[in-house]
Amino acid sequence: MSTLPAPGASSPAAGPTVVVRTVPLAATDPLLAYLPSGRPHDELLSWVRRGEGLVGWGAALTFESRGADRFAEAEAWWREIGHRAVVRDDVERPGTGLVCFGSFPFAADSAESARLVVPSTIVGRRDGQGWLTTISLDPQLTLLENPSVASDPEPPRDVAFADGDVSPADYAHAVAEAVKRIGAGEVDKVVLARDLVATASAPIDPRWLLRRLAERYENTWVFSVAGLVGATPELLVRRDKGLITSRVLAGTIRRTGDDAKDLALAASLARSSKDLEEHEYAVRSVAEALAPHCSSMNVPEAPFVLHLPNVMHLATDVAAVSVDDASSLTLAASLHPSAAVGGTPTAAAVDLIGELEQMDRGRYAGPVGWMDAHGDGAWGIALRSGALDPDDPSQITLYAGCGIVAGSDPESEVAESDAKLIPMRDALASD
């Protein structure tokens, strides 16, 4: 594995040449089934939805950065790697050739680092077309044989849950204080999160979590980057040959499991002034951030209700046409943090999060996804997720957050956060 320093830390001439080869792959097995056993959890990579996307393993190159310039430094590093790459791509689609996976901390002052990982092996599938990519620093790159399906992962054992830095009582108190601040006019909306720590009796295999999430939440993007694992329903931005799309979620109600009741709840969600207000803030923040990079944009007048197994969300799909060469990562940086995970106005809401939340979110609620050498890629918001402890892989910290507006009730927000923890809690179950 090779790690390059941040831009400016050394001469560009010191960087390696990356050799990349992509060939078609005729394979119909689930993508996640190819992730091999026995790999460190931070070298297992995924971006999969409804059976398509990318998985990768190994680490030909990695990059880390912290602070306010983490996006710009990552972008500069990736451009430099692209300039050095020798690529033979027999498929030539977004996601083929040179590709990195990445995840970024929510806050500029987080103790966590932004991570980019260039896998040594990638298996991808799009519109039924499969491919295999190998990436190496060895100029005599030898293609691997077609990958085989790996052995099934073992489930976590003896999982116990404990409050993290923010207990349910702490969270209710923070919500109540946030409602007071909103009433005083400091912010219109703020998103507050809480954490839950899960500990097993042996190292947790992320492949188990990914398979469980993909089986139960096929309408989400199931991701794994550097030990951050989850299934996000929210697409921050996708850039695909000039077309830019974003799925905005804000406004949530818990499902009951009774179809008739859930239909009634969906109708009430679509009429809820509190949830519609929260959603409007989120959509507006995305549209305003994308506008400088777009020649035209379609923003539906009203949201639809997205049905997931555990909750329902108000959702809006924004589509736009790119007017410049901004990469998918540049677009993600311009959108982060959206009102869906930060609040409105952004700067004041982020300051209030730092004051009231009393924890470091790490990479929770930050951008997570992938990008190719042309700048095409997809970045979600790292929701419904957990971060495996790098020093103790038998422990994972789960996160969930809720948008707080003037009409928010503390106990209801605790219940909503419980609902949002269900996907990861269930993924840790062995039955």
Image (spheres, rainbow, N blue to C red):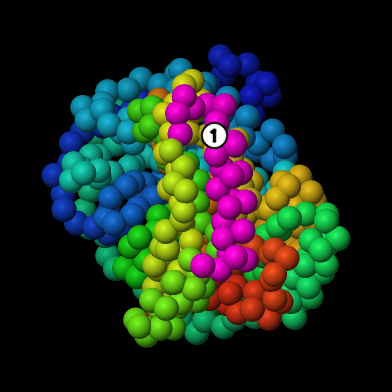
Q: Residues within 10 Å of mark 1 (few under 14, many from 20)?
A: many
> Quadrant of the rendered structure where residue 416 is?
bottom right
Q: Magenta residues: mostly which secondary structure?
A: helix
Residue 47 location, x and y as percent? 39, 50
Q: Is residue 429 above or below residue 109?
A: below
> Quadrant of the rendered structure where residue 114 is?
top right
Q: Residue at x 45, y 28 (%)?
A: 296
Residue 134 location, x and y as percent? 31, 35
Query: In the image, which residues are magenta?
Result: 271-297
Position of the C terminus by quadrant: bottom left
Q: Residue at x 40, y 21 (%)?
A: 85
Please tell me whether residue 295 belongs to the stretch shown in magenta: yes
Q: Residue at x 46, y 56 (%)?
A: 303
Of residues 400 and 397, the one nearer the viewer is 400
Q: Amino acid at mark 1?
A: Leu
Residue 373 location, x and y as percent? 41, 27
Q: Is residue 426 above or below residue 54?
A: below
Q: Is residue 18 above or below residue 271?
A: above
Q: Which residue is mark 1?
A: 290
SS under mark 1: helix
Residue 33 can be seen in this image:
yes
> Quadrant of the rendered structure where residue 197 is?
bottom right
Residue 32 location, x and y as percent? 31, 57
Of residues 360 and 403, the one nearer the viewer is 403
Please tell me whether residue 302 belongs to the stretch shown in magenta: no
